[in-house]
Image (cartoon, rainbow, N blue to C red):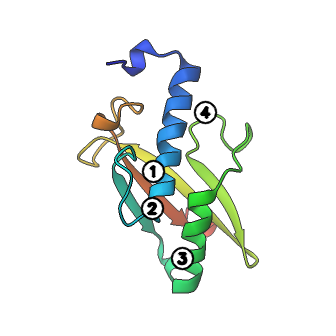
Amino acid sequence: MTTALDLDPVREAALIAGQNDAFRRSILDNNPVAEAPQGQFVMTRGVAALGPDAQLDLIRRVAAFDGFDADSDPQGWHEMGVIEFDGTTVWFKLDLYDVDYTYGSPEPSDPAQTRRVLTLLLPSEY
């Protein structure tokens, strides 16, 4: 098994980005693909207050998001994005935790040691 220590930073970033993309796409799937990493999806009170139709539209946009660039994604991990929704800016952020959701993951590129938390939030709630 290849560990993060065996990967150069560019390959590791590409691996993490692919895992983050798979996780984001899986949040809409009732039967997530086996390859999708494990994790949780949460939203803040501000996003919840937008209502169920807005929430569903935002979740779809997060799952389909592909607007990553060097300015918004300096590590290349596809861990944060900005969505404009009916005049409201909404962020999503992926954090990588250990399997107990207590600390940061010891090996972010290893799905067996990493759990993702995707948070949908308003900038004012950061």
User: At x 25% / y 43%, what residue is drawn?
Assistant: 99
- Tell me the CA gap for discs 1 and 2: 7 Å
Question: Label 3 near label 2: C-beta < 8 Å?
Answer: no
User: What number is the disc on residue 56?
Assistant: 3
Q: Mark 2 points at which residue?
A: 27
Quadrant of the rendered image containing residue 111: top left
Q: What residue type is labelled 4?
A: Gln
Q: Residues within 10 Å of mark 1 (few under 14, many from 20)?
A: many
Q: Is residue 2 above or below residue 46?
A: above
Can the viewer see residue 51? Answer: no
The residues bearing labels 2 and 3 have C-alpha atoms spaced at a distance of: 11 Å
Left or right side of 45 for 34? left
- Say which element carries label 2: loop
User: Does the CB distance between marks 3 and 1 fall below 8 Å?
Assistant: no
10 Å crowding of disc 4: few (<14), some (14-19), many (20+): some
Residue with the mark numbered 1: 23
